Image (tube, rainbow, N blue to C red):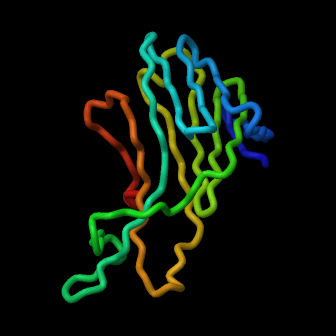
Amino acid sequence: MKIFTSSTGSAKLALLKELTVVEQTKEFTLGNDKVRYTRGNQSFQLTLNGATESFNIFYNYYEGWDQSGQKSGAYIFRPKTDTSKIYSTISKAYYADGQTTAIFVLQGDKAVTRVYFNRETDYVRNFGFLVETHLSSISVSDNVGKEVTFNLKTTLNNNRSFYTDSMGL
């Protein structure tokens, strides 16, 4: 698998390496900090200023409302119940060790997630990191609408702020 990266205006092609079952973890230095991904429990540990925080990324879905009244649909999140189900399971993990960026790619059966960490000293501490997610088609062949959710379970202190695009996923 290959991924495009850019650095000071020039694009480069980085070869992704698979994180194997034997290898289990991959750690990168980010200036004075570090990030580690553990394949077994699909978690990240981010060490900033000597303190380690963790986060997990996963995808669930809720069955869409199909009763009377406003139906669930585009820009309307109206689940049938409060119980979610697993939407995509991460089956493979890849990484790229760039000079300016460390990249993890989590490949699931219905979703691909890329997590980018800038390696510049204090960058992640001051500006955070980037998470991109891509979903494959959401099947409705069972005649059940699905409200897919991107879930980020974390111990990070983010001052209760989360930024997303207008899609909301």
Q: Position of residue 62 (x, y in %)?
A: 37, 68
Question: Which quarter of the image is occupied by the C terminus?
Answer: bottom left
Total residue callouts: 0
Q: Is residue 86 left or right of residue 83?
A: right
Nearer to me, 80 or 160:
80
Q: Height in image: 30 above or below 165?
A: above
Q: Looking at the image, which residue sits at the far left?
A: 69
Q: Position of residue 159 (x, y in %)?
A: 26, 30
Q: Position of residue 27 (x, y in %)?
A: 64, 24
Nearer to me, 123 or 19:
19
Q: Height in image: 62 above or below 12?
A: below
Q: Height in image: 59 above or below 101?
A: below
Q: Which residue is pictured at 37% across the width and 29% down the height? A: 156
Q: Is residue 122 left or right of residue 75?
A: right
Q: Which residue is pictured at 68% across the width and 43% down the height? A: 93
Q: Position of residue 69 (x, y in %)?
A: 19, 86
Q: Which residue is pictured at 68% across the width and 37% down the height? A: 6
Q: Height in image: 162 above or below 168?
A: above
Q: Is residue 36 left or right of residue 129?
A: right
Quarter of the figure with residue 150: bottom left
Q: Which residue is pictured at 70% across the width and 37% down the height? A: 95
Q: Is residue 33 left or right of residue 1?
A: left
